[in-house]
């Protein structure tokens, strides 16, 4: 869905889109903002040239004892199906998650930089959510927390379906509150408003919970969605015990390597182990409280500045290992501010108005006070660019094979310029350089 080349050259950021899928472009900036924010906070960042695969799972497989996976990685990324016999290997890729069977380097999952304006997942970016959850967690005394292990959200994965089944048979220890993205427009009331927050078991599409509501539970469930669960960090801030169900958790985000089971959270192997663990924790309440406080303290230090510091160290170490000079490649797009990204990825004028921040404090080099601002960049570097059509659509026979028909395109909010040329929008598109 997302793959981009990022180049930092003399304090400026340049991007090239290899994949930026049309139907999910409102989350495209979240893949770039970790680097833009780091460069803004640390303008001394060295020149670098990286490729980020902004997907849920790592890509460069290297399982010990299974050379087939390594050959597959070489065939996929070396371009001609060769192995490493000619000395070539897959490029270094940054991904949202890593594991012991892959060689990907850690990047930040898109949830860290959700849009600041309202969006379909409704969760604010970490810079906003972090202080909110810290305050919410501190506002609920330990003795008043509900004595249930709770999960709210989607129950689509096999692991979460098992979790729901166990909760249905163990209402005295567990509550699974199923809620999908599509429910946001129809379910208007919180569980506490309906008196359903203390009812254990498995309830479907009846109510929702704010993050503050979730902090009122003494035990919070973290179960796999697509090999990991990106809400783990949020749960830890509640000051509750996070029960980490290992089944299906194949991947980890970068911060998880700084956490210890039994110290910052409590791990169980399977969903069926949860009821017994809840009962054990109820009998050992002081231990449970210590784990909850340790998990919150650990994540309390990882605020927006902490994220930037991690990124600075990661990218500085990487840049020291580059063996070639960094030069912005032809056709790369200069990005100065967050709104440059919203303009670059926008699908229409109304879409753009829904996400623009109009905040030039996000710029790497903000305009001087009193500077007269106007289109196309309004203080940023935007000049009318768009992702290329081939990066925006899956043109396979079963998907959108005709999406990039220049005469009758699926969308004109893309570029048809070849690689190496400035990616200006389709001639029939809106005048993006005048907005």
Image (cartoon, grey):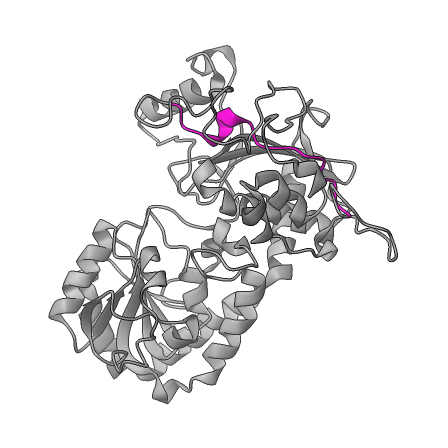
Q: Quadrant of the C terminus?
A: top right
User: Is 80 within the magenta?
Assistant: no
Residue occupying the point 30% across, 82% down: 146
Where does residue 349 sit, x and y in percent of width and height? 58, 45
Judge left or right: residue 108 versus residue 376: left
Residue occupying the point 54% across, 61% down: 126
Q: Depth check: 56 or 177 in front?
A: 177
Residue occupying the point 52% across, 14% down: 87
- How many dots with numbers? 0
Where does residue 361 sit, x and y in percent of width and height? 74, 57
User: Is 386 within the magenta?
Assistant: yes
Where does residue 299 sit, x and y in percent of width and height? 51, 66
Q: Quadrant of residue 423?
A: top right
Q: With respect to residue 245, does 218 lie above or below?
A: below
Instruction: Answer whether residue 320 is visible to the viewer in this image.
Output: no
Tell me where the magenta segment starts and ends, as one range.
379-395
Q: Main secondary structure of the magenta part?
A: loop
Instruction: Answer whether residue 362 is visible to the viewer in this image.
Output: yes
Residue occupying the point 41% across, 24% down: 73
Judge left or right: residue 428 versus residue 24: right
Q: Quadrant of residue 57?
A: top left
Q: Depth check: 44 or 171 in front?
A: 171
Q: Quadrant of the N terminus?
A: top left
Where does residue 260 sit, x and y in percent of width and height? 41, 62
Q: With respect to residue 257, does 349 lie above or below?
A: above
Q: Quadrant of residue 35?
A: top right
């Amino acid at each position: 869905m997302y793959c981009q080349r990022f180049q930092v050259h003399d304090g400026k950021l340049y991007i090239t889109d290899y994949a930026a899928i049309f139907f999910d472009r409102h989350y495209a900036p979240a893949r770039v903002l970790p680097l833009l924010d780091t460069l803004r906070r640390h303008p001394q960042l060295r020149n670098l040239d990286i490729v980020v695969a902004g997907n849920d799972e790592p890509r460069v497989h290297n399982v010990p004892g299974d050379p087939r996976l390594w050959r597959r990685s070489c065939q996929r990324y070396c371009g001609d199906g060769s192995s490493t016999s000619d000395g070539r290997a897959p490029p270094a890729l940054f991904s949202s998650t890593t594991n012991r069977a892959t060689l990907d380097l850690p990047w930040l999952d898109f949830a860290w930089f959700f849009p600041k304006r309202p969006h379909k997942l409704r969760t604010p970016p970490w810079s906003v959510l972090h202080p909110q959850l810290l305050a919410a967690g501190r506002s609920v005394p330990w003795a008043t927390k509900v004595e249930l292990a709770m999960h709210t959200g989607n129950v689509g994965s096999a692991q979460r379906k098992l979790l729901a089944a166990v909760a249905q048979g163990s209402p005295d220890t567990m509550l699974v509150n199923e809620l999908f993205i599509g429910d946001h427009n129809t379910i208007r009331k919180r569980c506490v408003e309906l008196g359903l927050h203390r009812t254990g078991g498995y309830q479907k599409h009846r109510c929702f919970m704010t993050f503050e509501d979730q902090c009122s539970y003494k035990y919070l469930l973290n179960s796999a969605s697509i090999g990991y669960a990106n809400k783990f960090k949020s749960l830890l801030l509640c000051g509750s015990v996070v029960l980490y169900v290992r089944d299906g958790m194949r991947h980890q985000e970068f911060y998880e390597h700084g956490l210890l089971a039994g110290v910052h959270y409590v791990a169980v192997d399977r969903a069926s182990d949860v009821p017994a663990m809840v009962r054990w924790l109820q009998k050992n309440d002081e231990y449970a409280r210590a784990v909850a406080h340790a998990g919150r303290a650990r994540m309390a230090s990882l605020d927006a500045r902490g994220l930037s510091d991690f990124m600075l160290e990661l990218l500085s170490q990487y840049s020291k290992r580059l063996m070639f000079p960094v030069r912005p490649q032809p056709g790369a797009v200069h990005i100065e501010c967050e709104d440059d990204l919203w303009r670059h990825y926008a699908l229409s004028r109304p879409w753009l108005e829904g996400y623009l921040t109009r905040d030039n404090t996000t710029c790497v080099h903000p305009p001087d006070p009193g500077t007269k601002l106007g289109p196309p960049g309004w203080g940023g570097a935007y000049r009318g660019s768009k992702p290329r059509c081939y990066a925006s659509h899956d043109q396979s026979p079963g998907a959108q094979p005709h999406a990039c028909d220049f005469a009758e395109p699926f969308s004109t909010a893309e570029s048809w310029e070849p690689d190496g040329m400035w990616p200006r929008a389709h001639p029939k598109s809106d005048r993006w350089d005048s907005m």
